[in-house]
Image (cartoon, rainbow, N blue to C red):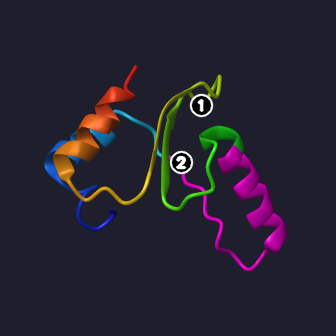
């Protein structure tokens, strides 16, 4: 995704309208991993990896959730645009 889909012009353009935040749950610190997994479950209602969430960072209102590595640029971009507010 990060190498092929994110840099595609349409996707990059949509992502440019958003602020990116990332959660990594594969560190050596198990307490940190547990905290990240708990946050992902609270926001996305899934532990699937990868999971993408479009949300308002101030209110934590979730607009859209997508799990899985969608490789179709047009489908992924349409999903991203569905979460723009």
Cβ–Cβ below 8 Å for labels 1 and 2? yes
Residue 5, how many percent across, how many down?
A: 25, 58
Residue 13, how many percent across, how many down?
A: 22, 40
Crowd rating for badge 1 (residues with CA inside 10 Å; few <14, some 14–19, many 20+): few
In the rendered structure, the answer to whether residue 4 lies left or right of residue 56 reads left
In the rendered structure, the answer to whether residue 74 lies left or right of residue 27 reads left
Crowd rating for badge 2 (residues with CA inside 10 Å; few <14, some 14–19, many 20+): few
Question: Mark 2 or mark 1, which is nearer the start of the sequence?
Answer: 2
Q: Is residue 41 visible?
A: yes
Residue 65, how many percent across, how many down?
A: 48, 39
In the rendered structure, the answer to whether residue 18 lies left or right of residue 27 reads left
Against 55, residue 21 (above or below) is below
Against 40, residue 80 (above or below) is above
Instruction: Out of 22 and 1, give the one closest to the viewer.
Output: 1
Q: Secondary structure at mark 1?
A: loop
Give the labeled residue for mark 1. 57
Give the labeled residue for mark 2. 21
Q: For residue 44: magenta?
A: no
Image point (60%, 42%), residue name? 44
Q: For residue 32: magenta?
A: yes
- Residues in magenta, as a range: 21-41
Image point (63%, 56%), residue name? 47
Image point (74%, 66%), residue name? 33
The C terminus: image quadrant? top left
Q: Is residue 16 visible?
A: no
Residue 79, image quadrant = top left
């Amino acid at each position: 995704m990060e190498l092929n889909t994110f840099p595609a012009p349409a996707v990059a353009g949509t992502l440019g309208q958003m602020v990116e935040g990332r959660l990594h749950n594969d560190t050596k610190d198990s307490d940190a991993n547990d905290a990240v997994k708990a946050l992902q479950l609270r926001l996305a209602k899934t532990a699937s990896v990868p999971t993408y969430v479009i949300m308002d960072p101030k209110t934590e209102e979730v607009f859209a959730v997508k799990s899985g590595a969608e490789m179709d640029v047009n489908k992924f971009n349409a999903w991203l645009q569905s979460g723009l507010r």
